[in-house]
Image (cartoon, rainbow, N blue to C red):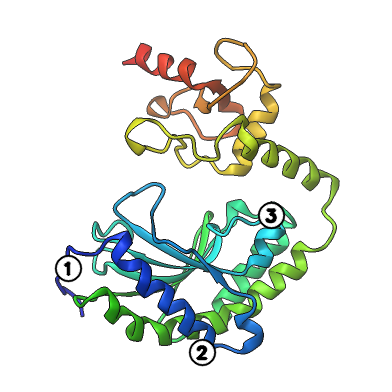
Amino acid sequence: MKGTIVSNSITCESLREPCLELFEQLKGGVTPERATRLTCNGVVQPHGTNRNVLLWRVWDPRLRKLGYDQRFACIRFHYDPTHWENREFVWCLQLYFNKRCAYRHSEAIQKLMLQRASASCPLGFERFADERRVQLAWYFNHAGSPEALVPLVLPKLVLLTEAVGPIFDEMVEISSRPASEAEHTLLAAIQKLSRGLASPNPKLGGGAIFNRGISPVLRAKVIAKSGNACGICRQPLSGEVHIDHIVPVARGGLTELGNLQATHADCNLSKGKGRA
């Protein structure tokens, strides 16, 4: 299917009903027990970084109750007309796990994902792992209607769901164990972050994400280090908070705790204009 021309009519709206139908048929294709442990997005959404990529997710809601955002431990189906992730294909069905967002028993969870993902990789899927994520992905092209995706994707979705379901079960078991004192401190900082002290992905004008690859865990540590004071004006932090490189990346600055500071959005943007 390499080189297939993909229709330009694919939108969040045109994909919504096929994805919901896909989910209903998925529940009928897996074991009854597994079906009760699945939920999905009711809408198709643009990706947070590349707004041209459209995403739909299926996940185990038990993980969300234990503190895992469904964006970072899920099965996701995406349309990528810009070839942002793959140069040959525009559609992808994948298990996606963000290692940087494993807060509770992170070492055990990451070890589980690395070991079990390799052993559970279904036929036709590609395994990928780096310091940030673990993926099992099936890439393909499709030139037909959105509705025609359902019979095409369903067998692979059932295969992937049955393969990774036991991994999610083990994640739930590990995450249910009592957290250590250090993990409680980190979780408290992250919860404070999510309540509004700073957005996990602060946005600038035009939908750009101001993060430069800074993980939520590192972001929480930077804010905790700040003592609730802006690193530039030294006034109390409030409203939207940016994480700023003290020595800019363009001048060789590293994305590490010692070179990062929490700032007011206005202070950080003024600093950037001063360097321009």
Res 69 quadrant in image: bottom right
Q: Is 131 positioned to the left or the right of 108 in the image?
A: left
Which residue is disc 1 drawn over? 7
Going by the numbered disc 1, the residue's amino acid type is Ser
* Above or below 77: residue 213: above
Element carrying mark 3? loop
Going by the numbered disc 2, the residue's amino acid type is Gly
Mark-to-mark CA distance, 3 and 1: 38 Å
Instruction: Please give the count of numbered marks on the rendered protein.
Output: 3
Of the residues under marks 3 and 1, which one precedes in the sequence?
1
Q: Position of residue 24 (x, y in %)?
A: 48, 80
Q: Nearer the viewer, mark 3 or mark 2?
A: 2
Going by the numbered disc 3, the residue's amino acid type is Gly
Q: Are marks 1 and 2 in contact (CB under 8 Å)?
A: no
Q: Are marks 3 and 1 in contact (CB under 8 Å)?
A: no
**Label 3: how many Cα within 10 Å (few below 14, some 14–19, many 20+):** some
Q: Is 88 positioned to the left or the right of 36 in the image?
A: left
* Above or below 254: residue 14: below
Q: Residue at x 63, y 88 (%)?
A: 32
Q: Position of residue 13 (x, y in %)?
A: 31, 62
Res 256 quadrant in image: top right
Q: Residue at x 52, y 40 (%)?
A: 214
Element carrying mark 2? helix
Which residue is disc 2 drawn over? 29
Q: Position of residue 173 (x, y in %)?
A: 76, 70
Q: Are marks 3 and 2 in contact (CB under 8 Å)?
A: no
Element carrying mark 1? loop
Q: Residue at x 56, y 27 (%)?
A: 260
Mark-to-mark CA distance, 1 and 2: 29 Å
Which residue is disc 3 drawn over? 67
Q: Is 18 positioned to the left or the right of 142 in the image?
A: right
Q: Position of residue 231 (x, y in %)?
A: 58, 17
